[in-house]
Amino acid sequence: MIRFEQFGWRFAEAPCWALRDIVLTIDRGEFVVIAGPSGSGKSTLAMAMCGLLLGRQEGEGRGRVLVDGDDVAGIPLYQTAEKIALVQQNPETHFATLTVADEIAFGMENRCLDRAEIERRSAEAMQWLGISHLRGRALATLSGGEKQRVAVASILAGGPAVVVLDEPTASLDPESSTALFRRLAVLCRRQGLTVVVTEHKLALLRRLGSRVVFLDAGCVVADERWSTSDDDRQDEGAWKLGLAGRQPCPLSDPTGEPVARLSQVHVTPGDAEILTQVSLCVQPGEIVALTGPNGGGKSTLLQCMAGLVGPSRGAVEVCGSSVVSPPSAALVRRIGFVFQNADHQIVSDTVWGEALFASRQFGVADATVEEEARRFLAGAGLAGRRQDHPYRLSWGEKRRLNVVSAILHRPRLLLLDEPFAGQDWENLGVLLGAIRRVVEDVHAGNEPDAPNSLLKNVAAAPCGGRRALKNADAEGQRRVLQQPAKAGSPGPGACVLVTHDPRIVTRFCSRVVFVADGRIIVDSAVAEAFDRLRSLGHGAYVADPQDPWSAIAGRVDRGPRAILGAAAGAG
Amino acid sequence: MGQRRVRVPRQRRPMVEMSYQPGRSLLHRLHPLTKVAWLVVLTVTVFLTDAPVSPLVVAAGALILLTTCGIPPWRAPGMRVWLPLAVAILVTHALAVQTGTPLAGPLTNEGVASGLRAMGRLVSVVTMSTLFVLTTDPVSLTCALMRGGLPYRWGFALVTSLRLAPVFRMEAHHIYRAQLVRGVAYQAAGPRRGWLVLRHLCLPLLVSALRTAHALSLSMEGRGFGRHRRRTFTREVAATRADVIAALLLPAAVAATLWQPIARLMTGA
């Protein structure tokens, strides 16, 4: 159905090839998962097979991509799209109309199908995706998961043989993600639809996909049938990356002054209440996981703590001071915020300028901070991209840049809204290590200009943050954390982060706050919170011990040769 | 121990947003083109008449219709701005025009009539436009226009604008907040504020808009948009008996509004 023949692609002005010598065949009716580290070329591969590169994007290509025997470079996009259609990561940029029914009919109306046929196919597509009840709804009123399903239905109604989904669940909660993948798997089995998904959440796809193609640095480094034996090797890769086995963050200091406190907070912009009677206390040194379904109020809660959203009732305090909206200069200096959309924060012309942007605004961008920025960018795999425009980075790389920019001025309260979307385990390790160190370092009372470098262990190692994380001395860390804060120091820090990944919660956070319908449903230590979530029927938010991703990641850590060897051995 | 009662402060109900408000009122059910005809014809008519009362009657009718649609005039979008402005226009005209018969103090009959006419025109046009926007589904309107001969590429330019306007507004909010929390001092005074807004809000918003437009164009082209000169429509926008009655009533409404110039024409005065 789809064949890549020695295909390569380099974007204009890019120093290296995004895809190299890709040789890949995807047969009709397969459910193929394209996996790989952030920036490995997954989205470019998806665009290439949909005919969105050759002749349409500035760049240089070689080799061919054939769909049903036709070279996609030589046929118009609409003709390719009748056979193979792309569902983009963000459904907001997919919709051309205002209602569900109009959106699903849109493609068929353009192809001049008659009304009865459009009605029939629309009903069928909505039934497949389980969204018949949404037919009359305005798109603006749908949740993230519903929007993504409508986007898929609008593609399926056109009757393509192949559907390509580019990280469709990047911003979805686990329940919505699982529901979407299950629907696609059923379509694949029953209707013979070919499904290609670029995705990091392999745990969700384990029992649904038939084949996984692994990319690294633009090359196919593994292409194998899904094997359940991978499950037995859980955590192997994560161990290698210095994540598994870490104790939940032991930093909480219940006797100290809370870093952030919300008391009976209501947020009511207009008629709808987004947060209802929310009370939350974030203790020094804590790393709190904020989780829950899309649209539950997590982002609003974070923005409320930063003074970006004013409560209609109740009080918010950060570092002992009342938070008002808009926030004061003193408050924003104490806060490091990463927004959900990576692009919203980017204003500089270079990666280097963007990393130092907040520090320069706060007047703390001295030589020490610059050195830290240099080291951290190296750890995050961005050392060679310092003079590139941030918009040239992949989504995952932008997220890492967002985090660097948010932590360099040593905030006391880190507020991170889904900072790990689009990150593979390897880069996740770098981010988690850096975030943890910010909390620890501030906890130990290090001021921004102190000689004790924020990221000294993360990036000083020859291999950047990854090796440093592996070698991290847990006992040493704990000693640092138990040191009292210096007199006149900024005081202990904390982090509240939104994540849908229970594996991160288990290995990294000290506490779980589950928010749904604007209320805090669960607020307790990780193990207890998981028990409660299970009993409440939210099992999707609880860590799954069988996770094949780490096994694959482990092989990546040993390099492409090891993967190819493993694949050959399996064959 | 009895629970302490928490006194909840009474909140002021917010203004209705200036966008389509779904509903089942008579006005909602009218064909969009019928409403376009009424809006255009009555707007022209209130500027043609020189009777001071006629525009006020049209404005009063529009306000009553607004109420029947479930939107009290004081919650109508922009009304808290328009009504004081209209009163200011009335007062200014009444005091500035000194011709005609004196009534009381500086007021003359021609000054008051001129003020009422200007106020009536402003209020009637604003109220009718508001009524039209609040009760007309923009997609149905575009669909009706496209069925009526408007090229569908132009029609969808309007639909996608309507679709993206709230998206960009939300983006602007997010970008503003994202930069605010990174230390951008938007509250700075003078030209510095303008520069900060341009550099840290407008430029990222422009880049975001271009990227969104590019992604949307790929999505639309991928679904066959622009492939054929014509396309089919599944959305039904049918005229009903109410539309026929409304169309018949329009000339009567015009005649009633223009009764004074018509009477003058008839009598040759």
Image (cartoon, rainbow, N blue to C red):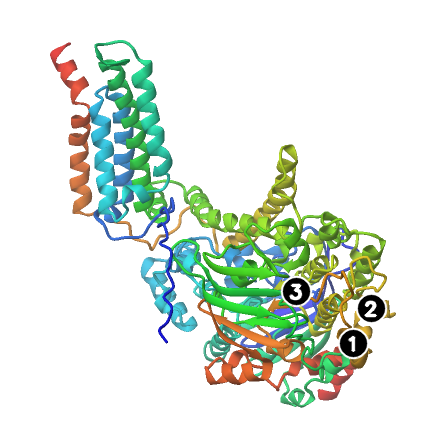
- Residue A511, percent across and down? 60, 76
User: Hey, what amino acid is under mark 2?
Assistant: Gly
Read off the residue under disc 3.
Answer: A45
Q: Residues within 10 Å of mark 3 (few under 14, many from 20)?
A: many
Taking the image as shown, residue B262 lies to the left or right of residue B140, namely left
Using the numbered discs, state the Cα–Cα distance from disc 1 to disc 3 in whole angstroms: 41 Å
* A264 vs B61, nearest the viewer: A264
Instruction: Give the residue displayed 67% in from the left and 76% down from the top.
Output: A508
SS category of the residue bearing label 1: helix
- First reached walking from the N terminus: tag 1 or tag 2: 2
| Labelled pair 1, 3 in contact (Cβ < 8 Å) | no
Quadrant holding the N terminus of chain A:
bottom right
Kindly indicate the quadrant of the structure image that contains residue B111: top left
SS category of the residue bearing label 2: loop
Taking the image as shown, residue A273 lies to the left or right of residue A203, namely left
Q: Report the residue that reaches farthest toward the front.
A: B1
Question: From the viewer's perspective, is residue B129 above or below residue B8?
Answer: above
Tell which subunit mark 2 falls on.
Answer: A
SS category of the residue bearing label 3: helix
- First reached walking from the N terminus: tag 1 or tag 3: 3
Instruction: Give the residue displayed 42% in from the left and 73% down from the top.
Output: A128
Quadrant holding the C terminus of chain A:
bottom right
Which one is in front in this view, the residue at disc 1 or the one at disc 2? 1
Residue B87 marker: none
Residue A290 seen in render: yes
Kindly indicate the quadrant of the structure image that contains residue A495: bottom right
User: Hey, what amino acid is under mark 3?
Assistant: Leu
| Labelled pair 1, 2 in contact (Cβ < 8 Å) | no
Which one is in front in this view, the residue at disc 3 or the one at disc 2? 2
Residue A477 marker: 1
